[in-house]
């Protein structure tokens, strides 16, 4: 650490929190009863005309009823928080108090962001939960005068889940499962993964949702970064066919006509015949490629909806919901405006230098990225307040 505990403990990235929202609406739909088994329970939500009927993992919430929606927020958010990403689990435990003291009083930060990569620490084996470490960190942060943004840990599934249930893994364009290692190896369309993700988030929020020093909850981490939303698994194939059937009103003839499938004899007799855009000779139908991108975005939206429902169910009325989008917006298959409607404010990970770059990104590129992040959540659409 070269004698600089606080600076080393704080990650180099800065989360730019654009407070771009209007009035908060707390979700009040009654949840299903909890499962008594160690494996998450499965419950399918009915489809509506407003949302595609992809397979959904209804979160298992343990509270008998959701909190009453507040008439107004308690307290005002400051215009700007100054904070750092802090990963105390990566350092000796005896350094935590000194780190936090220096972060608050020497660096002058107001906020730490924690927890987003700690699934195994929270659930070291299937169904066994341990919060002792984060109990200590949260109490130490409060004593140091630091507010907390807590990240749900679903971006880094534990090895026991990936190895015990390989169907939760996403597949690359050649149909090969992405093996455990790195991060975000999960399939957004794996119902089993979403059940486990709902369970760990449920346990986390039951434990800390009422903690008023936690001012915000970050859902997952950097959706779609490093190609993680591009999934060709069997789960994704099944959901793709369901989504197409919904979009085209269960009418394969309509799909054929709209896509111009008479060209090169690409006409289909059933939605199950429509391929995912894996490698082929020349290229796939451009209309298929556009719909594939829309489908990928909708898959992320459903996951975000499920996770934010759990968070809002247990979080105190001042606890807001955000997601930290990565850069490279134009390479992502996500409708950022639609996704951001689930958030109280938008966060953006601003890395002027990253991924082995020899030089920082041009200032104009950084400015453009911040403009894009600011545009994701219109005041009239958001759940929070400007």
Image: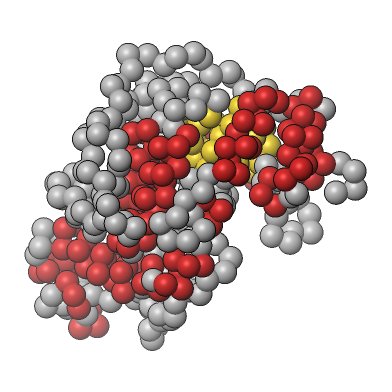
Please tell me which residue lies in front, 352 or 264.
352
Q: Quadrant of residue 97?
A: top right
Q: Residue at x 31, y 74 (%)?
A: 234
x and y, in percent, of residue 325 in the image: 52, 46
Colour setup of the view = secondary structure
Q: Is residue 257 above or below residue 75?
A: below
Q: Residue at x 20, y 83 (%)?
A: 265
Q: Work out whether residue 338 can be spotted.
A: no
x and y, in percent, of residue 108 in the image: 76, 25
Q: 340 left or right of 146?
A: left
Q: Work out whether residue 237 can be spotted.
A: yes
Residue sitting at the far right: 2
Q: Is residue 232 above or below residue 319?
A: below
Q: Is residue 252 above or below residue 128?
A: below
Q: Quadrant of residue 100?
A: top right
Q: 359 left or right of 179?
A: right
Q: Quadrant of residue 287?
A: bottom left
Q: 379 left or right of 25?
A: right
Q: Is residue 187 above or below residue 345?
A: below
Number of marks present in the image shown: 0
Q: Residue at x 39, y 64 (%)?
A: 187
Please tell me which residue lies in front, 50 or 11.
11
Residue sitting at the far bottom: 281
x and y, in percent, of residue 81 in the image: 63, 25
Q: Residue at x 40, y 22 (%)?
A: 317
x and y, in percent, of residue 208 in the image: 47, 34
């Amino acid at each position: 650490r070269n004698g600089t505990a606080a600076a080393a403990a704080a990650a180099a990235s800065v989360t730019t929190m654009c407070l771009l929202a209007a009035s908060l609406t707390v979700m009040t739909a009654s949840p299903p009863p909890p499962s008594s088994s160690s494996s998450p329970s499965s419950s399918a939500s009915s489809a509506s005309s407003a949302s595609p009927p992809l397979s959904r993992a209804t979160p298992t919430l343990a509270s008998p009823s959701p909190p009453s929606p507040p008439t107004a927020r308690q307290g005002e958010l400051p215009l700007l928080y100054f904070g750092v990403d802090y990963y105390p689990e990566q350092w000796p435990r005896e350094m935590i108090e000194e780190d936090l003291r220096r972060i608050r009083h020497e660096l002058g930060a107001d906020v730490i962001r924690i927890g987003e990569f700690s699934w195994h620490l929270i659930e070291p084996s299937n169904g066994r939960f341990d919060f002792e470490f984060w109990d200590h960190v949260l109490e130490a942060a409060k004593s140091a005068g630091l507010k907390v943004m807590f990240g749900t840990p679903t971006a880094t599934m534990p090895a026991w889940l990936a190895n015990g249930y390989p169907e939760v893994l996403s597949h690359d364009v050649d149909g090969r499962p992405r093996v455990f290692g790195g991060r975000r190896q999960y399939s957004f369309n794996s119902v089993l993964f979403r059940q486990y993700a709902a369970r760990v988030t449920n346990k986390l929020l039951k434990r800390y949702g009422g903690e008023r020093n936690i001012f915000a909850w970050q859902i997952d981490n950097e959706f779609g970064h490093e190609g993680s939303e591009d999934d060709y698994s069997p789960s994704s194939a099944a959901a793709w066919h369901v989504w197409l059937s919904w979009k085209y009103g269960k009418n394969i003839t309509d799909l054929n006509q709209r896509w111009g499938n008479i060209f090169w004899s690409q006409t289909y007799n059933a939605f199950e015949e429509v391929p995912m855009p894996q490698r082929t000779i020349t290229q796939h139908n451009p209309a298929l490629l556009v719909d594939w991108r829309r489908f990928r975005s909708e898959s992320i939206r459903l996951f975000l909806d499920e996770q934010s429902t759990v968070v809002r169910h247990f979080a105190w009325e001042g606890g807001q919901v955000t997601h930290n989008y990565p850069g490279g917006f134009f390479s992502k298959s996500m409708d950022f405006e639609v996704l951001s409607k689930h958030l109280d404010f938008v966060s953006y990970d601003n890395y002027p230098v990253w991924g082995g770059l020899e030089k920082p990104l041009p200032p104009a590129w950084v400015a453009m990225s911040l403009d894009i992040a600011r545009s994701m959540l219109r005041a009239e659409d958001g759940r929070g307040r400007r």
